[in-house]
């Protein structure tokens, strides 16, 4: 009876603050609607004990309860995330443990490899269900806003290759190469001699198959290798969606390694997710805690100011910074739509528990980018200390239309 009275009081409090299209189904068969609207989301509490998750609705609590089957949630993932954030916002105080806490982890080669494999080595077939056919798992670039996901991913790769002014025959290192789409594009369009490194065994195997199928083995070397073990120098270096795994304390060393690997007249680009908290804090209300536990172990997001500072500490000069937050909100929304459209194919590939993790994770990312809780920046840099005459006068070269890159399709290769 005590829990029931608590829940009744909590529901009355939420109703007094906001109207949510949410239905709460109780363990006794009764239900309560939190507005006069038709519910878009239903949360079922199978036992009296499960009510505690609603009484303390942090994103970590609700997300964990959903993943572990302690509550049942029905509805579209984007609606689920929006309503859960509203419950947290109207119940919890944005301070203390639930504020944008800064978390730090110990990073080494073994732990980093384990974390990468946990996230990426689900199965290639799993990712094929919601990514584009080229398997580009990073923020797309919607030049006009009406591109398909596949078109926007090609434009993202071309945008990067233009930004670093890749020239025919140059050497290119791609740190965290994924399934190889960027190095394949660079070799096909520019004849670049590429090295792609990844810690994911699944990515490594499929990327090598795709390179061979494209007839590019003479230009592309895919390695199962930590970036800290790469030697030599490269004309161009790209890192796309990888530095989130480096760790805040290790960013100066990370950029120092890029500096060491970069040719004297070379150019590099870092593309990655950042915190919008100046103190490098996680997303509020326990969102970061959920992601660390279930999705990206040991992931850490730096504020853009910290990224720029540590780049300089690593011996690099920043030439250009572009915010693509809107683009990642759109990318994650499309991934979420694809995920739900292929739910029946994904469940047996992932298992019910992992299915639930990803169901809310992708939609949660879309929400976080939309609401300015996290962001995405592309940063172009060179070795510090170069003569000014070696630097471009303007950004025009990044946006000039080149028909060879605008009209050729992305490589669509299957094993």
Image (tube, helix red, strand yellow):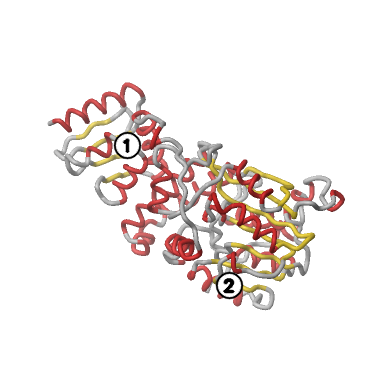
Residue at (17, 28) in percent of width and height: 5
Determine the CA span between mark 1 and mark 2.
44 Å
Q: Are there few (<14), some (14-19), or many (20+) residues within 10 Å of tag 1? A: many
Residue 245 placement (x, y as % from top left): 52, 55
Q: Which residue is mark 1?
A: 57
Q: Which residue is mark 2?
A: 223
Q: Residue furthest top?
A: 16
Q: Position of residue 291 (x, y in %)?
A: 42, 49
| Image quadrant where residue 99 sits | top left
Residue 316 in picture, x, y percent from top left: 71, 52
Query: Is disc 1 placed on a helix, strand or loop?
Result: loop
Q: Residue at x 69, y 70 (%)?
A: 232
Quadrant hosting residue 37: top left
Q: Quadrant of the N terminus?
A: top left
Q: Secondary structure at mark 2?
A: strand
Q: Is residue 200 above or below residue 314?
A: below
């Amino acid at each position: 009876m005590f829990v029931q009275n608590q829940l009744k009081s909590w529901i009355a409090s939420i109703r007094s603050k906001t109207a949510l299209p949410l239905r709460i189904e109780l363990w006794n068969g009764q239900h309560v609607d939190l507005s006069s609207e038709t519910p878009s989301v239903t949360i079922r509490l199978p036992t009296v004990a499960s009510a505690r998750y609603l009484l303390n609705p942090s994103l970590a609590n609700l997300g964990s309860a959903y993943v572990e089957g302690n509550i049942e949630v029905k509805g579209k993932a984007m609606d689920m995330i929006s309503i859960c954030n509203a419950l947290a916002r109207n119940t919890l105080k944005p301070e203390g443990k639930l504020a944008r806490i800064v978390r730090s982890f110990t990073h080494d080669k073994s732990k980093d490899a384990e974390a990468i494999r946990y996230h990426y080595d689900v199965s290639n077939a799993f990712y094929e269900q919601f990514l584009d056919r080229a398997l580009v798992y990073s923020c797309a670039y919607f030049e006009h806003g009406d591109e398909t996901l596949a078109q926007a991913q090609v434009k993202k790769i071309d945008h990067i290759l233009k930004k670093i002014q890749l020239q025919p025959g140059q050497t290119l290192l791609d740190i965290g190469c994924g399934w190889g789409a960027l190095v394949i594009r660079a070799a096909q369009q520019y004849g670049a001699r590429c090295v792609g490194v990844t810690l994911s065994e699944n990515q490594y195997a499929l990327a090598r198959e795709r390179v061979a199928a494209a007839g590019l083995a003479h230009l592309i070397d895919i390695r199962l290798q930590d970036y800290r073990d790469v030697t030599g120098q490269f004309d161009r270096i790209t890192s796309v969606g990888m530095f989130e795994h480096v760790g805040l304390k290790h960013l100066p060393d990370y950029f120092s390694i890029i500096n060491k690997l970069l040719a004297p007249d070379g150019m590099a680009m870092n593309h990655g997710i950042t915190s919008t908290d100046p103190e490098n804090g996680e997303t509020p209300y326990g969102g970061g805690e959920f992601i660390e536990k279930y999705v990206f172990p040991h992931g850490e997001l730096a504020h853009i100011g910290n990224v720029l500072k540590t780049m300089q500490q690593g011996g690099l000069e920043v030439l250009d910074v572009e915010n693509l937050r809107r683009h990642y909100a759109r990318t994650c929304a499309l991934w979420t739509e694809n995920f739900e459209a292929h739910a029946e194919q994904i469940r047996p590939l992932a298992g019910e528990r992992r299915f639930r993790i990803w169901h809310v994770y992708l939609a949660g990312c879309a929400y976080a980018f939309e609401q300015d809780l996290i962001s995405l920046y592309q940063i172009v840099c060179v070795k510090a200390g170069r003569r000014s005459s070696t630097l471009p006068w303007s950004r025009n070269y990044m946006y000039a239309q080149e028909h060879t890159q605008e009209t050729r399709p992305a490589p669509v290769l299957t094993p």
